Image (cartoon, rainbow, N blue to C red):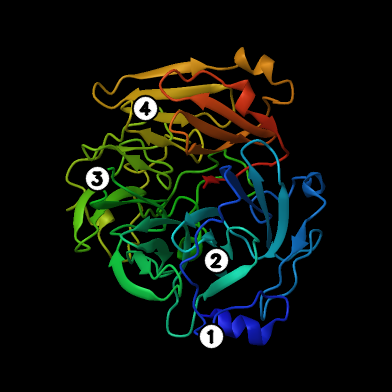
Amino acid sequence: MISRRSFLALSLTLAACSSTGQLGALLRPPGRKRPRYFISTPSSYWKKQDLSVLEPMSKTLRLPGIAAPDLRGDQPFTILTAVNDDGTDLHRVLIPLAYHCVANSPEAGVVYLMGNHRPSALLALDAEDLEVANLVLAPQAGDERTFGGHGVAVDGHFAYTMNGNKKGFYDSISIRDPSTLREVQSYSTYGFQAHEIRLSPDKKYFVCGHYGSYLGQGPYKGMGIYGGDGSYGMNRSPEFVYPSSVTMVEVSSGKRFRALSDVKSGQEGHADSDEHYNAYLPNVPAKIHSRKNIEKHPRFQEGEYTKPDRKEFAVTDNSLGISLAYDRKFGEVIVPDRGSPRLLITDSKLFRQRELDFGEQTKALPWLKVEGDFVSGLDFHPDGKHYILSTSAGFAAFERGTHRLNPAMSFPLPLLVHSHLCII
């Protein structure tokens, strides 16, 4: 773990820090009143993209012991985009290593960038000047875990998924001090290849999404079933399977509360839940229809398996994208289709799913090109009235409940794809 004091000693480019080497409880400066959007675009996901559309960079960050980022080099890097919700005050920052998404800690005055590949990193940046505040690199000596890509604020701390990188063993939830980034507690996720982590609406349970072996990452290399060239196409059936799943883990104790795995095997790395502890995926249907008795099923237990089990866990679902959100105000689960101008809305009481086509509305946004996998991120706007979709060409704002496009709050900005959205 590298503290702010270490950064100051190792790099003259870092901002001055306190004598304790810890972040203070910084508050948002009173001069900035507009909400701010944060997007991380990691080069390692979509190398075929033309990253030049994101230039020029506002600045380049350097991290101790890590090669300087090069927009046209082979080493992994990330472009962080930060912009006000009206399109003003745009900043693009080039950062070493790949970071899957951004989360925030208002109390600490930082945003966190979270990686999910070796070497992975948890990087804290000052939310205002986007300078390095703290860093944890993984794996570390004596700890082979790497960050799983997502985190969530909980009880004055931050929790992150961690991949143990040992075949057949459960992954973990790392609960850390938001300022020092030191781990204060660790729980099992009770699943394999943990990725997204959220909180249930009552904040009693962590909701953990697991890819299992389907992506062929980490210790499951060679067991994946999706295209290795960045495509989504399912190109073969798995022979040996560690199933995908969604688990709910009690925040106070670390005990497993629920375990779910959809009967349609496939991607379950991104998930959310409602107040009745139903879990949802960016799929059709969104609500998980779980296999029975998976707590006792040997494939969901720890251990190495060598017996082929192609039939039971053959993938029949390809996922509609990487983002979804439960809107408790309206009792709806919102799933944007990454490849078409439609929203899938599920009523959390009746579990009816309806499709809303917003293609006609996009005529008001001539810059919004509906092509390829153009929708990526989804987050709620702080005004309580809207949610925002990040697209490859910019941000589209929709009214909560009505799902009407609001052109006045939408604006163009090249973002490329696979970019989760964080609004603070």
Residue 152, position as x, y percentages in the image: 40, 55
Residue annotated with mark 1 = 19
Q: Are marks 2 and 3 in contact (CB under 8 Å)?
A: no
Label 2, secondary structure: give it: strand
Q: Is residue 152 above or below residue 290?
A: below
Q: Which mark is residue 66?
A: none
Q: Which is nearer the N-term, disc 4 or disc 3?
A: 3
Residue under the point 71% across and 46% down:
89
**7 or 369: nearer the viewer:** 7
Residue under the point 72% across and 51% down:
91
Residue 370, position as x, y percentages in the image: 67, 24
Q: Report crowding for label 1: few under 14, some 14 to 19, many 20 or more residues within 10 A (C-alpha).
A: few
Q: Are marks 3 and 1 in contact (CB under 8 Å)?
A: no
Amino acid type assigned to the residue bearing label 1 in the image: Ser
Q: Which is nearer the N-term, disc 3 or disc 1?
A: 1
Q: Which is nearer the N-term, disc 4 or disc 2?
A: 2
Q: Which is nearer the N-term, disc 2 or disc 3?
A: 2
- Image quadrant assignment for residue 191: bottom left
Residue annotated with mark 4 = 285
Q: Are marks 4 and 3 in contact (CB under 8 Å)?
A: no
Amino acid type assigned to the residue bearing label 3 in the image: Asp
Residue annotated with mark 3 = 202
Label 1, secondary structure: give it: loop
**306 or 185: nearer the viewer:** 185
Amino acid type assigned to the residue bearing label 2 in the image: Ala
